[in-house]
Image: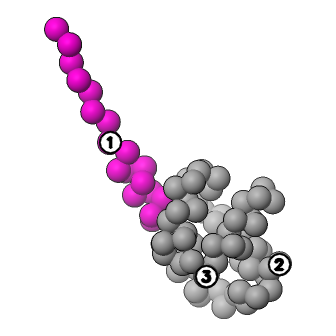
Amino acid sequence: MFGVLLVSCSSESEEYAIAADQLCKCMNESGSDLNDTSDLKMNIGVCLLDVKVDLKDPQMLTQVEKKCPEIKEGFEEFIDDM
């Protein structure tokens, strides 16, 4: 007798969506200058202090790109510097 186990990744994907929402909201509230790379990366770092997901996971970048594309490049640079 064989059984089939189906595992859903939806809760993990949802965690990345929530983390991106929190980041985007925090960045909007920070008043960060999107043209100042150092200011942008510093604010991204502050906004991500309480995030509990793997920031280097491609799901996080995908969610950031969907929810707040204006900080995508700064987020990528922040991750590259980690």
Residue type for callout 2: Ser
Residue furthest left in the image: 1
Is residue 37 found left or right of 22 in the rendered image? right
Separation of residues labelled 1 and 2 (CA atoms): 38 Å
Q: Nearer the viewer, mark 2 or mark 3?
A: 3
Separation of residues labelled 3 and 1 (CA atoms): 30 Å
Confirm whether residue 46 shows in the render: no
C-beta proximity under 8 Å, tags 1 and 2 = no
Disc 2 secondary structure class: helix
Task: From the image, tell me which residue sits under label 2.
Answer: 38
Can you say whether 21 is above or below 13 in the image?
below
Q: Residues within 10 Å of mark 1 (few under 14, many from 20)?
A: few
Task: From the image, tell me which residue sits under label 1.
Answer: 8
Can you say whether 13 is above or below 76 in the image?
above
Task: Residue 80: give x, y in percent of width and height.
Answer: 77, 58
Separation of residues labelled 2 and 3 (CA atoms): 15 Å
Can you say whether 11 is above or below 32 in the image?
above
Is residue 50 found left or right of 9 in the rendered image? right
- What number is the disc on residue 70? 3
Residue at the spot 43% in from the left edge and 49% down from the top edge? 12
Residue type for callout 3: Glu
Magenta extent: 1-19
Location of the N terminus by quadrant is: top left
Residue at the spot 83% in from the left edge and 78% down from the top edge? 38
